[in-house]
Amino acid sequence: MKKFFACALCFLSLSILFPPAVRAATVKNADSKPHSLVVKRGADSFQVVIDSNGTIKDLCAFCTIEVVGFSLLDIENELMLVIRDGVLSVQK
């Protein structure tokens, strides 16, 4: 029984020290036209174009994404985002 609790304590300690990896969000454009995206993380930013009905995998995590001229969304650890009619939202 002591061995069981020792193993359980070890596993719990490791899970606290090494949390699950953060995964970057994938953005899917459901619109029939391309959109320009501005991605901001801290003081850094860059711009990228997503094609009509296109997808950008692993764009960012813990960042802000702006669909230029349409919408703005703060991203934490969301896995899938979608653009519909220029509006960026979390896909459930």
Image (tube, helix red, strand yellow):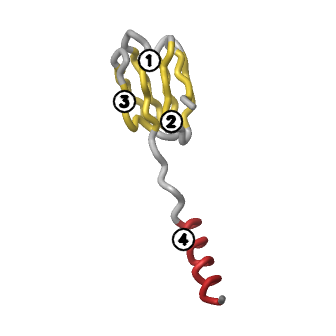
Pick the front one: 19 or 64: 19
Residue 7, compared with residue 77, is above or below; it is below
Dot 1 falls on a residue whose secondary structure is loop
The tag earlier along the polypeptide, 1 or 3, is 1
List the residue tagged with mark 4: 14
The residue to which callout 3 is attached is 56
Which image quadrant for residue 59? Answer: top left
Q: Are marks 4 and 1 in contact (CB under 8 Å)?
A: no
Which amino acid, by three-letter code, is at mark 3?
Ile
Count up the numbered dots.
Answer: 4
Sequence-earlier tag: 2 or 4:
4
| Mark 3 vs 2, N-terminal side | 3
User: Circle 2 sits in a helix, a strand or a loop, which is it?
Assistant: strand
- How far separated are the C-alphas under marks 2 and 4? 28 Å
The residue carrying mark 2 is: 63
Closer to us: 18 or 65: 18
Q: CA distance from mark 3 to mark 2?
A: 15 Å
